[in-house]
């Protein structure tokens, strides 16, 4: 692929924001990028394009829902005036909703708050977006278990991300589909200790999906 096809240009700033899968210890032991897909993607980009002057920031926080993102959107994102914003959010929203948690974010609320975040970027003329699907590393589609319930509800959240990717002309990274493809050949425990938080092998799947999407 020609260099010109790579979407990040010289002197651009890229901010990754989301929940624990983005955070990955970036605030504690693995500052500043964490030890997950963000760090893998940055290292691979640097190896491929060492001459390109890029600034990366990781603003993931474990446990966040889209409501948490909305509440910290200005201080953790807008003030940095990024050229690109990569967002991965949704699985905590879904889990809180299933568990009838006070922090529950059902699909209609998820859509409303996510839209508020994206529209605030549009107002700032910061329209370069990467939307990463929430994912669940499981194939339990029929047992009636908690994993089964998550997989049944997840498409409602995925469809919202898909809708916004089209509406806001964002790059769409379909991580859930990527994991489902991987699970045709590997057991889930190859990628994760439980369906939400991946091992390094799972983070590599996310990073690879992201790199494919951005060229």
Image (spheres, grey):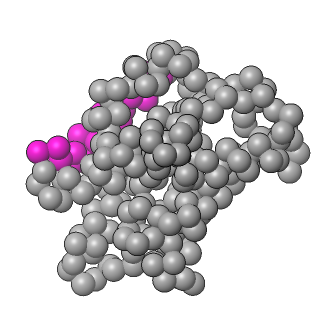
Let me know if residue 115 is in the magenta part. Answer: yes
Q: Position of residue 212 (x, y in %)?
A: 69, 54
Whether 50 is drawn above or below 43: the answer is above
Residue 60 position by quadrant: top left
Residue 132, given in percent of the width and then of the height, sits at 50, 48
Identify whether 43 is placed above or below 137.
above
Look at 29% across and 51% down and name the residue there: 92
The spot of residue 97 in percent (x, y) is 18, 53
Q: Magenta: predominant secondary structure element?
A: helix
Residue 131 seen in render: no
Residue at 38 percent of width and 40 percent of height: 61
Magenta part of the protein: which range?
A: 102-121
- Is residue 147 visible to the viewer in this orientation of the structure? yes
Judge by depth and name the residue closer to the eye, 168 or 141: 141
Number of numbered discs on residues: 0
Residue 107 shown left or right of residue 207 in the figure: left
Residue 10 falls within the magenta-colored stretch: no
The quadrant where residue 82 appears = top right
**Image position of 185 (left or right of 139):** right
Q: Residue at x 28, y 73 (%)?
A: 147
Residue that appears at 43% across and 29% down:
118
Compared to 4, does 157 lie above or below? below
* Residue 4 placement (x, y as % from top left): 85, 37
121 and 165: which is toward the camera: 121
């Amino acid at each position: 692929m020609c260099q010109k096809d790579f979407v990040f240009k010289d002197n651009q700033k890229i901010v990754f924001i989301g929940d624990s899968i983005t955070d990955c210890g970036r605030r504690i032991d693995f500052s500043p990028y964490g030890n997950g897909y963000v760090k893998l993607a940055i290292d691979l980009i640097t190896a491929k394009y060492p001459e390109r002057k890029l600034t990366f920031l990781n603003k993931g926080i474990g446990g966040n829902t889209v409501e948490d993102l909305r509440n910290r959107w200005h201080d953790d994102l807008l003030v940095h005036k990024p050229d690109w914003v990569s967002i991965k959010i949704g699985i905590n929203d879904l889990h809180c909703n299933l568990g009838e948690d006070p922090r529950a974010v059902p699909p209609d609320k998820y859509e409303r708050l996510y839209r508020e975040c994206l529209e605030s970027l549009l107002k700032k003329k910061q329209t370069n977006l990467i939307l990463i699907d929430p994912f669940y590393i499981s194939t339990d589609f029929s047992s009636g278990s908690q994993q089964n319930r998550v997989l049944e509800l997840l498409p409602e959240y995925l469809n919202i991300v898909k809708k916004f990717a089209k509406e806001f002309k964002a790059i769409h990274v379909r991580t859930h589909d990527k994991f489902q493809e991987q699970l045709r050949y590997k057991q889930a425990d190859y990628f994760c200790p439980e369906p939400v938080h991946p091992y390094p092998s799972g983070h590599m799947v996310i990073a690879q999906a992201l790199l494919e999407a951005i060229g």
